[in-house]
Image (cartoon, rainbow, N blue to C red):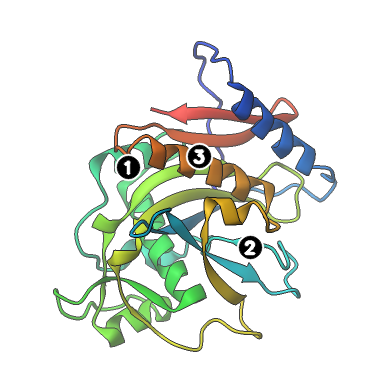
Amino acid sequence: MTGLVAKPRARKAKTASEPEAELLVKLNAAERRMDWPNCRPKDAATIILLDRKGKVPRMLMGRRHASHRFLPNLYVFPGGRLEPADARMPVYGAIDAESERRLLERVQRPTLSRARGLAAAAIRELYEETGLLLGTREAGAPKAPASDWSAFESEGVFPNMEALTYVARAITPPRRPKRFDTRFFCADADAVCGQTPGIVGPDAELTELHWLSFRETEAIELPAITRAILTEIEQRIAAGFAPRLPVPFFFWHGGRFQREYIP
């Protein structure tokens, strides 16, 4: 997760509800070791692919390879760091205005290029880790600016920015082995227009994929922040997934996790 966050703005204190307070306690308890050399967090994007056709919503999650230094064997959403070519990739449409505005909040040197690059990165990472192409074939084949995006060109798929909604942000605490400033995006599974086989497997970054309900995620091992984001998404769905809903922002300040909302 990247880009140093600006100093939290003064605002009227908000008392956390019992579930919210418990969530922060669990996040703080997960950060037991913080003695690595400090580093600046890197910009990153994560995508939560939602299938809401059935009786209960399901999310696509993958299990990370056991050999990974970062979060081995844990279930995660597809995602990764922002790459230079992400902001230059031709795309279809634009992310909604509220999401774009919020992506520019609480960052140093905010630019539209950076905001749009983060949204594109979520789509690219989905493909790189799962083989799923989130986009449209209606606009022809885009010209990929780098090899990271070559599959979209060869498959004739423009990344569909209109399918994304910005839903959360989290910055890894200091003195962790890796630090990211991650923006979380949601997209409907219907926005996927194709899949390349063979990307997920025993020797890949993700060894298996599963569509899981919120109830099913309670029985698997997850990073603490992933479980926190799941709680936020479940509440967002219950509230109708309206664009007006604020974006929760988790960050480390004063020796503990804080959560504020980007209105």
Question: The residue under label 2 is which amino acid type?
Answer: Tyr
Which of discs 1 and 3 lies nearer the camera? The answer is 3
Seen from the viewer's position, the closer of residues 42 and 15 is 15
Would residue 246 be visible to someone looking at this image?
yes
Q: Tag 2, which secondary structure?
A: strand
Q: Residues within 10 Å of mark 3 (few under 14, many from 20)?
A: some
Toward the viewer: 190 or 11?
190
In the image, which disc is placed on residue 99? 1
Amino acid type, mark 1? Ser
Residue 224 in the image: state x and y as whole percent: 68, 47
Q: Secondary structure at mark 3?
A: helix
Please state which of residues 33 and 243 is positioned toward the viewer in this rendering. Answer: 243
Query: Rounded to the nearest whole Å, what is the CA distance between mark 1 and mark 3?
Result: 16 Å
Q: Nearer the viewer, mark 2 or mark 1?
A: 2
Question: Which image quadrant is residue 104 in?
Answer: top left
Q: Going from the N terminus, do you reach mark 2 or mark 1 first?
A: 2
Relative to 11, residue 163 above or below: below
Q: Which residue is mark 2?
A: 75
Residue assigned mark 3:
232
Q: CA distance from mark 2 to mark 1?
A: 26 Å
Give, as a three-letter code, the residue at label 3: Glu
Q: Position of residue 73 (x, y in %)?
A: 72, 68
Residue 79: x, y in percent?
52, 62
Work out how far the residue at label 2 is from the one at label 3, CA to CA, in angstroms. 17 Å
Q: Residue at x 24, y 65 (%)?
A: 91
From the viewer's perspective, is residue 248 above or below residue 158? Answer: above
Viewer-proximal residue among 136 and 75: 75
Residue 129 horizontal side relative to residue 220, left or right? left
- Is 183 displayed left or right of 228 in the figure? left
